[in-house]
Amino acid sequence: MQLGIDEVRLTTERTQSHTRQFRIGFVMEQTLGHVTHGLNLFRAIEADPTVCPVWLPVTYDGADRWERIPGVKSNWSLKGSLRAKDALHAVLAKQKLDALFIHTQTLALFSVPFMHRIPTIVSLDATPLNYDTVAVEYGHAPTQKNWLEQKKFGWNKKTFHAAQGLITWCDWAKQSLIADYGVAGNKIAVIPPGVDMRRWDFGAQPRTAQSEKPLRLLFVGGDFARKGGNVLLDAFRTDLRRTCVLDIVTKSAEVDAQVQDLENVAVHRGLNADSPKLRELYAAADVFVFPTLGDCLPIAVMEAMAAGLPIIATHVGALCEEVEDGINGIVIPPRDTDALKNAVSALQHNPNQRLGMGLASRQMAEKRFDGTVNYAAILTRLKELCR
């Protein structure tokens, strides 16, 4: 779900009608998992009577001038930052903002002049150099050491240093800010996205402690190939289909042709983030399977943890900050079909281990990814800037 323009306008009008102390602009990237993050933050702010939010969602596609300029329309960093700059100019021409929250740094490159006038926090899931380690899986070439990339590196570094504060989703990104960009550690707070722990509390899983029934696997990934969906289908087609059932939640249309000859596979499309139907699939699952090839800190895994599921995932990006091998799941190498089959088999034949890992997932989610706590922490830092 994206923050629609009408929804933003109505929300702003409604909040302005109350007595609010802090008028804060939220420039929010609306791509991939950042959409879910924006929705969760939106809900948290709606419940805070002291914040008057001004929502500035920035989407990848649009009908503005930047979509027509060669060299800009295909470069998300340039296009997104220019759209954010235009949105901020339009808002500031009509009203004053006490603080700014920009998520992610992709939208912040042209906002340094605003940061000199308005206290600003830049939020990010990964630094550009973090992203380079998984860029190929997103269809991008890693950064080359030429003059243009050096200039882009300096541009990002200047942006990070101009912000009054930085929030990273994970320690992986924080360490890169310190080591690669020279940002002082005390300027950075690690605050992951969060989920509503009450909405994702399904109690004991109905199938977890049973070994005689087919194991129900759940895969959630909008970009099916990048999330390792093809690896999962290879494993399912050769061995797992005899003893498992598989639910696939994705936006990718090509999956239909790949599963048409497979029984015990259901493809679910058009499910919004945090929707009742999506939560039903998590509640019915025994194991969350996420053999992703390229990721940073996926929110889908946080949801699986909150749902109390054992998780099979790859050692990619900051996933090790969500899935601890042998504790709340099994970590496998990317593209390793045999390792995936072995991990599923191990959990299938050890229901007590599944139960224990599922309980550990829920406990870890309560400690690390409670949206009530984490989004309140973001707002606390923004209010401190306002003061």
Image: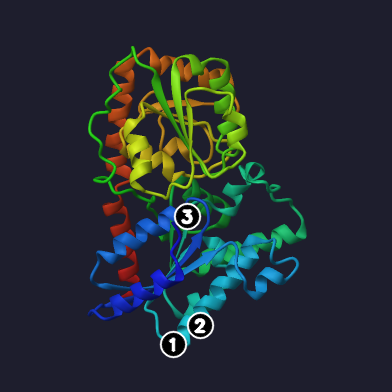
* Residue receiving disc 1: 94
Instruction: Tell me how far mark 1 sits from mark 3, CA to CA.
Output: 27 Å
Instruction: Tell me how far mark 3 sits from mark 2, CA to CA.
Output: 23 Å
Q: Quadrant of residue 304?
A: top left
Q: Amino acid at mark 2?
A: Ala
Q: Residue at x 39, y 20 (%)?
A: 215
Q: Quadrant of residue 366?
A: top left
Instruction: Describe the element under mark 2 as helix, strand or loop.
Output: helix
Q: Which mark is residue 34?
A: 3
Asked whether residue 9 appears in the rendered view, the answer is: yes
The quarter of the rendered structure image containing the N terminus is bottom left
Instruction: Tell me how far mark 1 sits from mark 2, CA to CA.
Output: 7 Å
Does label 3 or label 2 sit earlier along the sequence? 3
Q: Position of residue 311 (x, y in %)?
A: 41, 29
Q: Residue at x 61, y 30 (%)?
A: 258
Q: Is residue 145 left or right of residue 342?
A: right
Q: Amino acid at mark 3?
A: His
Asked whether residue 185 appears in the rendered view, the answer is: no
Does label 1 or label 3 sit earlier along the sequence? 3
Q: Is residue 34 above or below residue 197?
A: below
Bin the neighbour count of mark 2 within 10 Å (Cα to Cα): few under 14, some 14-19, many 20 and up. Answer: few
Q: Position of residue 320 (x, y in %)?
A: 45, 35
Q: Is residue 352 above or below residue 152?
A: above
Contact, CB < 8 Å: mark 1 with mark 2? yes
Bin the neighbour count of mark 3 within 10 Å (Cα to Cα): few under 14, some 14-19, many 20 and up. Answer: many
* Residue receiving disc 2: 90
